[in-house]
Image (cartoon, rainbow, N blue to C red):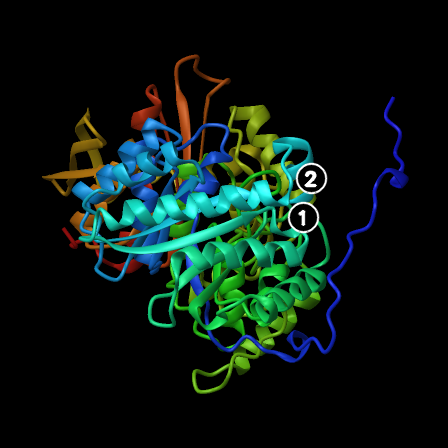
Amino acid sequence: MSVFTHTKYTPFQPVHITNRTWPDKEITQAPIWSSVDLRDGNQALVEPMTVEQKKVMFKMLLDVGFKEIEVGFPAASQLDFDFVRWIIEETDIPDDVYIQVLTQARPELIARTYESLKGAKKAIVHVYNSTSKTQREQVFRLDKKGIMDIAVNGAKCVQEHALKHPETEWVFQYSPESFTGTETDYAVEVVNAVAEVWQPTPENKIIINLPATVEVTTPNRFADQIEWFCREVKNRESLIISLHTHNDRGCGVAAAELGLMAGADRIEGTMLGNGERTGNMCIVTMAMNMYSQGVDPQLQLGNMDRIVSVVQSCTQLPVHPRHPYAGELVFTAFSGSHQDAIKKCLDNQTEDKPWDVAYLPIDPRDVGRSYQEVIRVNSQSGKGGIAYSLEQEYGLSLPRWLQVEFSPIIQKFAEEDGGVVTTESMKSLFESTYITGSAPYALGRYELQKDDGDSIRADISSSGSTISITGEGNGTISAFANALAKQFDITMDVTQYSEHALTIGSDSNAIAYIQMNINGDRYNGVAIDADIVSASIQAILATVNQFVVNSNKSNVA
């Protein structure tokens, strides 16, 4: 049996600093952002991203506006190497975007890294070695000089290879890995030695990345480390000080924010916090925190549903419904008093006034959400009773997000009808609300193809006429959504999806539930079919039918 005792742990020893200045600082401008979703985020996945998923993620990161994207550890795996080659050979990388790759400070790995980058226009070579006391003594069994020699020799090797490829604009980055577990004065010594090799200038800076590889103390102590480091390191004006915080204590965003106030210039993280153990610092949260204070984050986060959809589909990880700014429930009020306060504030809010609405730190419309998600009826027993009845009587296992959407519809029906809502009425209302796959457009024949990605050719009919549509994507759902988006000139992103076999009434049918964000509003579709792929496609079409009907656009085709 384990013994829960705190005495085995020793408190973090803070750096001694006087006249600290960071507590009086404010964040008034965005840092340089660097996404590490494709490297640090990817290596933490149970199932690492496929090449196709990486391509989708890379495009989304470009669309969001990242100018620095860490795309892999090419010396560590053939998959990463091939992906870096694909980016360079097949992608039109914008001229102001740097791709970044990671390598350990080992000659053979550095050589392989440069091989992967051949022909790149702009690239950041990120070299690292562990410097913490624990790693020195227990992992590498080297003294301080031995660890410093690894860093210096790695820096020399990086520089030598860069000189062989003058056609590329190189930026060097060094990380004393496990910086938070490294004596801060020793970290300064190692960084000074690396900088001495690279000889940066204010016009040709290098990046010094100070990672909280493991978060070991409170954010204020981390900020002290950063301010002390920035004071003591040589040639500070020629360095870009970068932070890479993890979330072991649940304070990754706070540590990055205070570290920025303490003098850092650059932030590494992942879009929704995926990463080793408890995750990386969430860039969405930190950037939106700035946005809520009137600071331009220099990232385009206005289509949050698309960001969530891409991250979920590429990482196979759910986004928590309470995740700041991105979760499906973060703008939702169940409490009656909260609902009343929100409604009154919204009634008083005008476009020419600063945002000032109770319980809503930002306008949900800014991230592509609408007020339809803000106020919902909270009747837990009602949702549970509806879901239980439909599952017991008809085998419909509604996912929780659809229960939340459907409950107010049932409640409104009950209030207008004035009586008990039977299960037959629930099913009828459910079908008329969500299973609308034949009006005004019905699905005809379709063909799927799988090459490097997925493509679909499908026929949809309306009022006796048939339209052929085609689309491509990362999976059948993505391909069909792409086809409909092109045909109707709309934007479509999957926000939720669920499926299951029907256990009552048929042994062969399956049901698909889907929620789409179409032009900024959410629509739910459901379809039943003997084939789950066909059911999924028809469910998507059901959402478009709702959009067409609600928008009075039955002639958009």
> What residue is shown at x 52% (from left), y 43% (from top)?
149
C-alpha separation, residue under disc 1 versus residue under disc 2: 8 Å
Q: Position of residue 59 (x, y in %)?
A: 29, 48
Q: Position of residue 517 (x, y in %)?
A: 37, 51
Name the residue beneath numbered marker 2.
Answer: 134
Is 220 left or right of 111, judged from the image as shown?
A: right
Above or below 116: residue 535: above
Total numbered badges shown on the rendered structure: 2
Q: Nearer the viewer, residue 135 or 323?
A: 135
Which corner quadrant of the image does residue 369 belong to?
bottom left
Name the residue beneath numbered marker 1.
Answer: 181
Q: Position of residue 217 (x, y in %)?
A: 72, 54
The reply to whether discs 1 and 2 touch (Cβ–Cβ < 8 Å) is yes
Whichever of callouts 1 and 2 sits on the residue coming sooner in the sequence is 2
Is 257 left or right of 444, judged from the image as shown?
A: right
- Element at label 1: helix
